[in-house]
Image: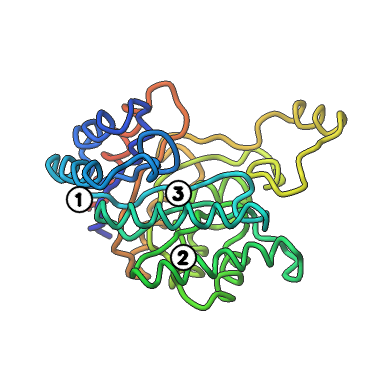
Amino acid sequence: MKLTNKIGVIVDSFGVGVRDGLVKAKEVGADGVQIYAVSGEMDPAHLSGTQRRELRSYIEGLGLEVSALCGDLAGHGFQDAEANPAKIEKSKRILDLAAELGTNVVTTHIGIVPDDTGSRIYDSMQRACEELGVYAKSMNAYFAIETGPERAAHLKSFLDTLSTNGVSVNFDPANMVMVTGDDPIAGVELLRDFLVHTHVKDGKRLRPVDPRDVYGYLGYGKMDHEKIAEMAASGAAFEEVPLGQGQVDFPAYFAALQRIGYTGYLTIEREVGANPEEDIRQAVAFIKSFKEQ
């Protein structure tokens, strides 16, 4: 197996701002970058046309390209029908910005997909994703749902209800391992027709956990004192660790991506750690070792 995929880095993982983060991404050997575009300096509402063109020129001048933008709006994703119109509108504006920066992928969390397909929350999420998917498809683009909150088979069953693949998948193997205990290799095969972007991250599952305690859920979260005490006593449910030190079987995972013909980015995400820059540098070297085999 010899990987040929380009390597990306989430700029925000460096914690130094966008421009300095872009420079660091180049320094650690990345080919491209993913950038959060929800608030602050990257909020589409704060970027004029001139600023967008200047930013794209700056990125290209560093010899980088944008693998994706992150458009995660939090707050239970699209579970709340009352909040959805504003969130859908902002998501569309983030996709517009992505196109101007040279990418057709916006990654996001949509909230945990309920088991009950007849529930109000399921209906709210389905309607929102249908509208977003149609909009993205009109631009030959994708809103990519990050894996983790539910098992791959359940996510696929939800995606199959939509009329287009404009809503697809950003595959994060560590989220699957840490939260649901799902198998990323089987997940790649299940979601092969929807996989448009990936995160490269590693982690360990320390004990079973309710995904609602990790990602939140509309109407859930007011825990009684007994449950709070129980969670505190049991300690952390999972741990994100540097690549190769967790429970993601990367040789098998990368081989699975090759089997389905995935040619997109392998984008490094590092959300914890005292020295993220060094962790990211080592992660780039880790991925490159599979390019040399």
Question: How crowded is the residue under tag 1: few (<14 C-alpha within 10 Å), some, or many (20+)?
Answer: few
Query: Residue 100 placed where, x, y %?
Result: 26, 54
Q: Which mark is residue 71?
A: 3
Three-letter amino acid code at disc 3? Gly
As helix, strand or loop, the secondary structure at mark 3 comes to loop
Q: Earlier in the sequence, mark 1 or mark 2?
A: 2
- Which residue is the site of mark 1? 292
Question: How crowded is the residue under tag 2: few (<14 C-alpha within 10 Å), some, or many (20+)?
Answer: many
Three-letter amino acid code at disc 2? Ser
Residue 31, compared with residue 197, is above or below; it is: above
Most distant residue in the bottom direction? 163
For image coordinates 52% across by 64% down, the residue present is 186
Which quarter of the figure is the N terminus placed in?
A: bottom left
Nearest-to-viewer mark from 1 and 2: 2
- Which residue is the site of mark 2? 168
Nearest-to-viewer mark from 3 and 2: 3
Q: Nearer the viewer, residue 260 or 67?
A: 67
For image coordinates 27% across by 49% down, the residue present is 66
Query: Residue 260 placed where, x, y %?
Result: 37, 70
Three-letter amino acid code at disc 1? Glu
Q: Nearer the viewer, residue 1 or 284?
A: 284
Q: Are marks 3 and 2 in contact (CB under 8 Å)?
A: no
As helix, strand or loop, the secondary structure at mark 2 comes to strand
As helix, strand or loop, the secondary structure at mark 1 comes to loop
Answer left or right for 68 relative to 26. right
Answer left or right for 162 relative to 286. right
Residue 55 is drawn in which quadrant?
top left
> How much space separates mark 1 and mark 2, taking CA atoms?
30 Å
Q: Earlier in the sequence, mark 3 or mark 2?
A: 3
Question: How crowded is the residue under tag 3: few (<14 C-alpha within 10 Å), some, or many (20+)?
Answer: many
For image coordinates 56% across by 49% down, the residue present is 177
Query: Residue 22 placed where, x, y %?
Result: 25, 35
